[in-house]
């Protein structure tokens, strides 16, 4: 249902809200050592502190999209911001690992209520060039936030503002939440579907089981040496997915509205968007993990210095995101995606060369040329992901479409450190960090090469240039 046009102030409020959950994916990573000392946390507890946020986020995304479609996207967005703010406060005052895990899971729920409403609101309130520019900004902010988290987390830990230590990485969310809460009511229009549809409780539980099994297994597997409980969780994952598919098909055939509509998943644009998400976002998070690990354990940089090493990448990413709309309008989504892959892969090769020829005298300045190329290429890839994935989604399924894409994106971000991190750990068994990071980057190059091949062969997904947006 088309509602009033989203103005610039409303767009800024939504993008400010988008920063919150995206930053919290990476900002915690640089605070783990401080948390371990303060709370006497074990490695398994630290892994769960990281994992429960992503699990709750991914599990509740589809439900968040459905609730926004039914009860109003601005209303559910505001509820999500309130939950996220309360959870951030609880994280900041947590006195035990159990309380911190609970608060992190609550943060994930709040984030899942927020994120689908942002993309869905852009999709139904904007058209033409305004829509294209907003999607470009959405992709730019979303990706940049992941890097901001690394840099900001290192800065907050180093400066120890107010003596709050690691707690400041959560308390920093509170003023942003307050700003978004007060501004969204005034500047963000309310949108919803004209008719409410029943909530798919069965589908929600099955999706929760599938994502929970996969991400818990990946988080705990390396720490528990892939003991039988981890293997069992991995085996349950496809069983939950199969059951979810069968129940969704049955519900849709009888006129119901499944949480993840099979008709939506049959759209070529959505299917290709999901493929892109799995390949690229797992590479992205895995890259950030492996490079940060190399800088800190292999080269002896502090968390603050390691975070600063990504500043050039983040700046190039943001500049590229601002240019992405012009690129899509001129060359189309498919060409822009291929150009982004080419630039990023060139940057990966340059980074391998930088490590090989400058080791062990690799510093922040040495990394700038390669990381600038990587960030610039990534910006074009991310901007096309949202444009491709949402291009064929009807307005009445905007929330569901946004939730499907975001669910797979967040799951892929969780998968990356386990996937490329596993490659890094396997090669680095004898402490050869240089060989390990080079091999990991080559594995990422292979995955990006597969994305290039699939994009080149898949012409059906991409609309003519006149329809690009």
Image (spheres, rainbow, N blue to C red):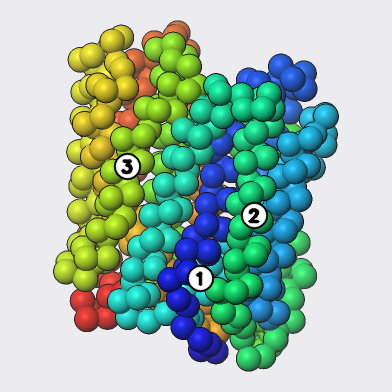
Mark 1 surroundings: few (<14), some (14-19) or many (≥20) residues within 10 A: some
Mark 2 surroundings: few (<14), some (14-19) or many (≥20) residues within 10 A: many
Q: Residue at x 40, y 28 (%)?
A: 308
Q: Is residue 162 above or below residue 149?
A: above
Q: Residue at x 21, y 31 (%)?
A: 369
Nearest to the observer: residue 31 or residue 157: 157
* Residue pointed to by mark 2: 177
Q: Is residue 97 above or below residue 425?
A: below
Q: Residue at x 62, y 35 (%)?
A: 169
Q: Is residue 127 left or right of residue 105?
A: left
Q: Position of residue 235 (x, y in %)?
A: 66, 45
Q: Which mark is residue 315?
A: 3
Q: Is residue 16 above or below residue 94?
A: below
* Residue pointed to by mark 1: 10
Mark 3 surroundings: few (<14), some (14-19) or many (≥20) residues within 10 A: some
Nearest to the observer: residue 435 or residue 22: 22
Camera-near label (3 vs 2) is 2
Q: Is residue 468 left or right of residue 51?
A: left
């Amino acid at each position: 249902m088309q509602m009033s046009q989203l103005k610039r102030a409303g767009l800024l409020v939504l993008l400010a809200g988008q920063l919150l959950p995206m930053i919290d994916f990476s900002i915690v990573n640089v605070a783990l050592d401080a948390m371990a000392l303060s709370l006497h946390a074990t490695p398994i507890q630290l892994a769960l502190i990281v994992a429960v946020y992503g699990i709750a986020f991914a599990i509740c995304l589809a439900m968040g999209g459905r609730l926004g479609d039914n009860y109003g996207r601005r209303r559910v967005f505001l509820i999500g911001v309130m939950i996220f703010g309360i959870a951030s406060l609880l994280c900041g005052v947590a006195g035990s690992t159990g309380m911190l895990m609970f608060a992190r899971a609550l943060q994930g729920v709040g984030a899942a209520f927020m994120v689908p409403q942002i993309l869905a609101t852009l999709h139904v309130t904007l058209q033409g060039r305004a829509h294209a520019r907003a999607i470009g900004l959405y992709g730019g902010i979303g990706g940049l936030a992941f890097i901001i988290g690394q840099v900001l987390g290192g800065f907050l830990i180093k400066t120890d503002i107010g003596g709050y230590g690691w707690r400041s990485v959560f308390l920093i969310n509170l003023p942003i939440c307050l700003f978004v809460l007060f501004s969204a009511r005034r500047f963000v229009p309310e949108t919803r579907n004209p008719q409410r549809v029943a909530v798919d409780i069965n589908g929600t539980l099955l999706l929760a089981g599938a994502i929970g099994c996969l991400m818990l297994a990946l988080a705990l597997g390396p720490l528990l040496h892939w003991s039988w409980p981890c293997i069992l969780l991995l085996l349950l994952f496809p069983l939950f997915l199969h059951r979810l598919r069968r129940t969704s098909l049955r519900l849709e055939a009888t006129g119901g509205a499944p949480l993840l509509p099979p008709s939506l998943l049959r759209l070529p644009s959505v299917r290709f968007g999901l493929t892109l998400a799995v390949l690229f976002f797992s590479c992205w998070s895995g890259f950030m993990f492996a490079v940060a690990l190399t800088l800190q354990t292999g080269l002896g940089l502090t968390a603050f210095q390691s975070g600063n090493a990504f500043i050039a990448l983040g700046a190039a990413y943001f500049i590229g995101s601002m240019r992405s709309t012009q690129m899509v309008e001129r060359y189309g989504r498919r060409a822009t995606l291929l150009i982004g892959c080419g630039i990023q892969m060139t940057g990966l090769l340059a980074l391998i060369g930088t490590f090989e020829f400058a080791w062990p005298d690799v510093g922040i300045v040495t990394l700038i040329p390669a990381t600038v190329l990587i960030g610039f290429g990534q910006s074009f890839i991310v901007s096309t992901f949202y444009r491709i994935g949402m291009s064929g989604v009807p307005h009445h399924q905007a929330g569901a479409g946004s939730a499907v894409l975001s669910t797979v994106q967040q799951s892929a971000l969780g998968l990356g450190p386990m996937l490329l991190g596993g490659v890094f750990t396997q090669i680095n068994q004898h402490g050869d960090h240089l060989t390990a990071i080079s091999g990991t980057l080559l594995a990422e190059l292979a995955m990006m090469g597969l994305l290039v091949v699939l994009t080149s062969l898949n012409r059906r997904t991409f609309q003519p240039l006149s329809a690009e947006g």
